[in-house]
Amino acid sequence: MLSAGAETLLRMVGWTFLPDLGTRILLNTYRNLQVTLPPRLGMKPSHPPPINTPAYRIQQRISFSIVILIYLVYTSAQAYLQAPPNFYQSLGVSPGVDEGTLKAAFRAFARFNHPDKVGPSGEARFIEARNAFDTLKDSTKRFAYDRFGPDVLSWASECTTMGDYIERGLMASCGFYIVTAVAMVLYAIFGQSGFGAFWRYNLFFTVAALELLLILSPEIPLLHYLFPSRVAYQHIGFLHQFFIYMSIAITRIGPAILPSFTGLGPTQGEWEQERNTLYVVVKQVTEIAAQIDREISRMIYRELKAAHGEVDDPVANGVAPEMDANVTPANTKTGAVPGSGDPSTSSLPGSSPNLRQRRVVGSNSRTTTSAPSAPIAGLGGLELNDGVMRKLSKEVEDVVIEKNLKRHPLLARIWREGVLAGRAAYERERESQFFDDQQVKKPTSRSETTAPASNPESDR
């Protein structure tokens, strides 16, 4: 069986290749499940993204992060569970035991584990138990042992008081932090990247502060509740190993979370290519939006012309419509305008007139050839004169605009919300007006009822 130091070194070596191996296994398993699992569940199989695509890189980074976190939890749990037992655990007592209970526990241990009874094989264990009893029965050594561990047995010739043990223990603890600080500085200078330096330094000072707290005040209720058989020096040893594993995890997981920061992300050429692709897509979307706008304008123009019953001559009116270069001009002999119903021109592609540019205010600036005013069946004999046509034009325009807006889901939802908000505002206005009318009527009726009756004699 390997020693504690060898197991710690083996776990640190495992950080160099196990996360990469685990990532490949996890990623391949996930990609295979994407193809094989959905058909078994009666679902359509999904195709995993090709290798070296942005979607594949995202899956790879997520898988690597999961493997790093799992290995971090595993190594931390192993460091905690494989810690050597303390003197209290060797004697089978709790850390807060008194001297009488400690003597009784040692006598019971010696009764069953003395070398005279178990033979030479139990001699090492009996010596360990006797050293534990000799250390714990002395209050000063017990104070030092709880904080600094078995190393205090070699300090007995140098230290006699609790202050001496504290000073000697702090000097011994500084060795770990000096070596760690030098390693962090060298890694910052010669390392491949500086990612995670902020978090490593914060973790460094956090561990140092926690160790100082455990040395000066080891009786922490939370730790005593979670780990009743552990003492302060064991918590400190676990903090040292956790700091090492966490620092390695931060260094390894950094490129997976922020590849662009660490220099392992897309290159400048890749960014340029993505930007050019995005520019082409945006340009295509803009052209499609402009074409849709032209088509809607042409549809609204046709609806309005049909409602007016007019044939407009844009050339004679001086408001020729804007058209594309590939659209032939209107036929001036027949008065046909593209989109006005002439089969020879209604199917021509291109942009239709813009309504805002077609609309000319004032009757003098527009000359139209209107259909003769005549009674219309179904309208009660109403004649479509100029005034009626202007009102009807506005109503038809609103109806056509509303119809085109409702064809788009997003615009339709905004339209409905606007209508509901308008109705609510109208109802509130009506209620406010009704309340104001009632307030005005009440003083008037009250003054009429309280007015004195007129005297006929005075009237005469």
Image (spheres, grey):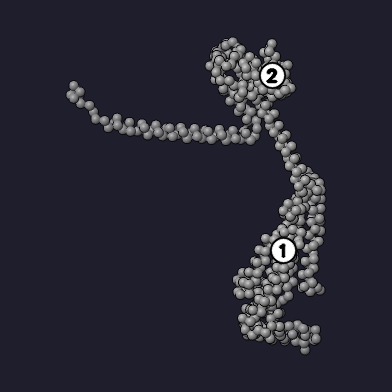
Q: Position of residue 442 (x, y in %)?
A: 35, 33
- Above or below, 225 relative to 118: above
Q: Residue at x 72, y 35 (%)?
A: 283
Amino acid, disc 2: Pro
Report which quarter residue 239 is drawn in: bottom right
- Residue 344, placed above or below residue 429: above
Residue 53 seen anywhere in this rendered image of the structure: yes
**Quadrant of image for the C terminus:** top left
- Name the residue beneath numbered marker 1: 247
- Residue at the spot of label 2: 338
Q: Position of residue 372 (x, y in %)?
A: 59, 10
Give the quarter of the image for residue 307: top right
Residue 457 coordinates in the image, percent (x, y): 18, 24
In the figure, residue 444 lies in which quadrant? Answer: top left
Alpha carbon of mark 1 to alpha carbon of mark 2: how far?
A: 74 Å
How far from the left and from the top, in percent, is residue 20?
A: 80, 58
Q: Which residue appears at 74% of the width and 85% of the height?
A: 127
Name which of mark 1 and mark 2 comes first in the sequence: 1
> Given the image, on which type of amino acid does mark 1 rest?
Ser
Residue at (53%, 33%) from the top-left corner?
422
> Residue 41, can we see it?
no
Few, some or many C-alpha atoms within 10 Å of disc 1 (few <14, some 14-19, many ≥20)? some
Q: Secondary structure at mark 2?
A: loop
Q: Looking at the image, is 101 positioned above or below residue 407?
A: below
Which residue reaches farthest front?
189
- Work out whether residue 291 or residue 222 is closer to the camera in this orientation and state it: 291
Left or right, 241 with respect to 216, comes to right
Position of the N terminus, as image quadrant, is: bottom right
Mark 2 neighbour class, 10 Å CA radius: few under 14, some 14 to 19, many 20 or more: many
Secondary structure of the residue carrying tag 1 is helix
Residue in view at x 63 percent, y 72 percent: 212
